[in-house]
Structure formats: C-alpha cells, structure tokens
C-alpha cells in the first residue's frame, strides 16, 4: 500500500515538473519573440530617423549654399530669364511673320489656280472635242471598211452570176439555133426534092418557122439576160468603187482627227504641267514656312521649359533668402533629431545585446519546448490515424 502511494506521488511529481518545463519553454519563446519584435521596431525607427536627418541635412546644406550665393544667383538667373524671354518673343515674332507670308502665299495660290483653270479649260474642251471627233472618225472608218468588204462580196457574187447567166442563155441560144439549122436543112432538102409531097413540105416549113421563132425568142432572152446581169455586175462594181473612195476619205479624216487629238492633247498637257509646276512652287514655299513655323514652335516649347526652370531657381533663391527663420528652424530640428538618433542607437545596441543574451540563456528551454511540441503533434496524428483505422476496420 505504501509502495503504491509512493509511486503515485513520484508520477504526479514528474508530471508537474514536465508541465513546468513546457510552460517555462513557452514563456521563453514568447519573451524572445517580444524582445525581437521590439528590437526590430526600434531599429526601423532608427533607420527612418537617420534618413530624415540625412534628407534634412541635405536640404539645410542646399539652403545655406543658396543663401551664401544669393546675390550671384539672383543676378545670373534674372539675366537668364530675360534672355530666354527675349528668345521666346523673337521666335513668336518669326512665327507671326511666317504665318502672314503663308496666308499671302495661300491667296496667291488660289488666284493662280483660278487663272490656270481659265487657261487650261479651253484646251481641255478642245482636247475632249478632238478626241470625240477622232473616235467618231475611227468608227466611221470601221463602218466604211465593213461596207467595202460587203460590197466586195456582192460584186464578186454579181460577176459570178453574170458569167454563169450569160453562159446559160448562150447555151440555150446555141441549142435553139442548132434546132433551127436542122429544121431549115430538112425543109431545104424537101423543097429541092421533086418527089416530096406538099404535106411534107408544109410540115417541114412549119417546123422551120417554129424553130426560127424559138431561136429568135432565145436570142432576145439572151440579150435581155445578158444586159440585166451585166448591169447588175456594173452597178455592184460602181458601188464598190464608190465605197472604196469613201474608205480613202474616211482614212484621211481619221488620220487628220488623230493628229488633231494628239496635237490638242500635247498642248493641253504641256500647259497643264507648266501651270501645276507654278502651283507646286508656291505650295512648296507654303510647306517650307509651315515647317519653319513648327520648328520655331518646338524651340518656343524648349525655351519655355528652360524659362520655367530658370524662374523656379530664382523663385527658390528668393524664397530661401526671405525665410531665414526656416533655415534656423531646420537646423534646430536636425540637432534635436541627432540627439534622439544617438539615444535610439544606444537603445538598439542594448536591445541587440539583450536579445542575444536571451537567445543564449533560453536555448535549452526553447529546444525542449519545440521537441515536446513536435512529439505532441506526432501523438495527435497517430491517435487520429488509429481512430480512422478502427472506424475503417469496424465498417
């Protein structure tokens, strides 16, 4: 019984010591973090104050430098300002002159364009008329050539018809005359034969008369047809000759129209180029003045920037010269900040030493705390894994 009681007391004592060690380690970690944060904040404050002192010192040095050289700066900058203002005024005057010249040249250009149009317009109308006449003459020539080609076909057809028709009626006339000769020979034979009967002689005479009448009819037909087809062929040839003369005349007219069109176009183009060259010369003068004006405008902008910078330097010098109390106040502020800076430097040094001392003195406690914490986390993870395994197995 006594042994059991002693064991329990030892176990409770060990647990108490373990809890005390864990709490002591936690307090050590917490105190170190707090001290480290205080050290970092103080160092940041020190750096910010150092930057402020550096900036204020630079500003103070600048104000003292300006104040010491104020008279020289004032005279120099006023001279620069006046010179720059004079340059700007000169540039603006030049731009006004260029603008007036450009306006005058623009008026001259408009007047020249109107005058040139009055000179070019008649030639343009003549050129257009000549071109239309040339087109019409070319069309008339093409029509005349087509008519000649058709007339040549008609003439050839009429000539062929003439020759074939004359051959045909002559062949018919020759046949009729041959029949007449045969009938006449038979009649002459019968007439010379004393034994021939009156009836046979009368029949032969009748046939001879009929053959003669047919031959006469064939002769008249041959004369009529020959005269008709010769007339038609002659008319076709006359028409062809007349059309060929028309083609010759149309060719001459077309050539003359083309020459007139070419001449009028050359005259128009020559005058047009001369007029446009004169207009382009004035336009180039206008463009040149516009470019010069733009260049002057850029110079004015550059000079204006210089003037603003020069005036800013002068204004700053005047401001510093008229406010010496600000320079004194800035000097006092710097001195006060330097005193505070020294105090913060000492505080940072003390905090750094304290932090390092605490790190050294609490290293064991913090290590034990971290180890216990890790073991606790591992134990919790194992317990969770065991519960999950049990639930899975039961399922």
Image (cartoon, helix red, strand yellow):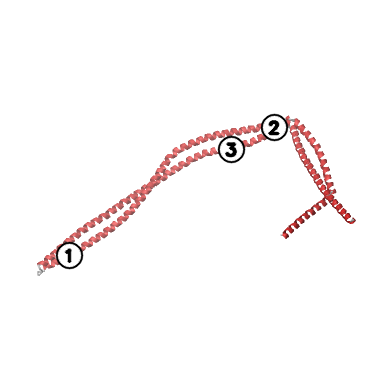
Q: Residues within 10 Å of mark 3 (few under 14, many from 20)?
A: few
- Position in image of residue 183 (x %, y %): 16, 65
- Residue visible at 55% across and 39% down in the picture: 287
- Describe the element under mark 2 as helix, strand or loop: helix
**Any part of residue 37 in sight:** yes
- Residue visible at 24% across and 55% down in the picture: 228
Residue position for label 3: 294
Q: Residues within 10 Å of mark 2 (few under 14, many from 20)?
A: some
Q: Furthest residue to the right?
A: 2
Mark 2 or mark 3, which has the lower sequence index? 3
- Describe the element under mark 1 as helix, strand or loop: helix
Q: Furthest residue to the bottom?
A: 195
Image quarter hosting the N terminus: bottom right
8, 61: nearer the viewer: 8
Q: Does residue 323 lie above or below 359 as drawn? A: above
Name the quadrant containing residue 132: top left
Residue 224 lies left or right of residue 18; in this view the side is left
Closer to the camera: disc 1 or disc 2?
Answer: 2
Which label number is shown at residue 315?
2
- Position in image of residue 346 (x %, y %): 83, 41
Verify CB contact (< 8 Å) between mark 2 and mark 3: no
Mark 1 or mark 3, which has the lower sequence index? 1
């Amino acid at each position: 019984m006594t042994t059991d009681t002693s064991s329990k007391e030892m176990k409770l004592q060990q647990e108490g010591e373990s809890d005390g060690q864990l709490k002591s380690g936690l307090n050590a970690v917490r105190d170190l973090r707090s001290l480290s944060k205080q050290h970092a904040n103080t160092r940041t404050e020190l750096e910010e104050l150092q930057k402020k002192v550096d900036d204020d010192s630079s500003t103070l040095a600048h104000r003292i430098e300006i104040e010491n050289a104020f008279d020289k700066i004032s005279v120099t900058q006023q001279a620069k300002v006046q010179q720059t203002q004079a340059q700007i005024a000169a540039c603006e005057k030049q731009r006004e002159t260029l603008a007036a010249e450009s306006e005058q040249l623009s008026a001259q250009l408009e007047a020249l364009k109107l005058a040139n149009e009055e000179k070019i317009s008649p030639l343009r109308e003549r050129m257009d008329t000549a071109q239309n006449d040339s087109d019409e003459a070319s069309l008339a020539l093409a029509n005349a050539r087509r008519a000649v080609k058709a007339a040549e076909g008609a003439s050839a057809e009429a000539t062929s018809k003439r020759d074939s028709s004359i051959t045909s009626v002559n062949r018919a006339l020759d046949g009729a005359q041959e029949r007449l000769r045969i009938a006449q020979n038979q009649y002459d034979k019968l007439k010379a034969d004393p034994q021939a009967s009156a009836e046979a002689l009368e029949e032969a005479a009748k046939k001879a008369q009929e053959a003669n009448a047919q031959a006469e009819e064939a002769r008249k037909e041959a004369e009529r047809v020959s005269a008709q087809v010769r007339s038609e062929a002659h008319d076709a040839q006359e028409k062809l000759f007349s059309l060929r003369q028309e083609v010759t005349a149309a060719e001459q007219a077309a050539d003359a129209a083309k020459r007139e069109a070419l001449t009028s176009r050359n005259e128009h183009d020559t005058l047009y180029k001369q007029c446009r060259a004169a207009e382009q010369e004035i336009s180039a003068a206008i463009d040149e003045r516009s470019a010069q004006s733009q260049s002057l405008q850029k110079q004015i902008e550059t000079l204006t920037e210089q003037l603003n910078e020069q005036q800013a330097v002068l204004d700053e010098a005047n401001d510093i010269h008229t406010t010496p109390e600000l320079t004194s106040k800035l000097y006092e502020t710097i001195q006060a900040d330097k005193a505070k800076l020294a105090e913060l430097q000492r505080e940072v040094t003390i905090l750094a030493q304290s932090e390092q001392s605490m790190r050294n003195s609490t290293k064991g406690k913090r290590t034990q705390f971290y180890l216990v914490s890790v073991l606790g986390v591992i134990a919790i993870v194992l317990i969770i894994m065991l519960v999950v395994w049990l639930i899975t197995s039961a399922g």
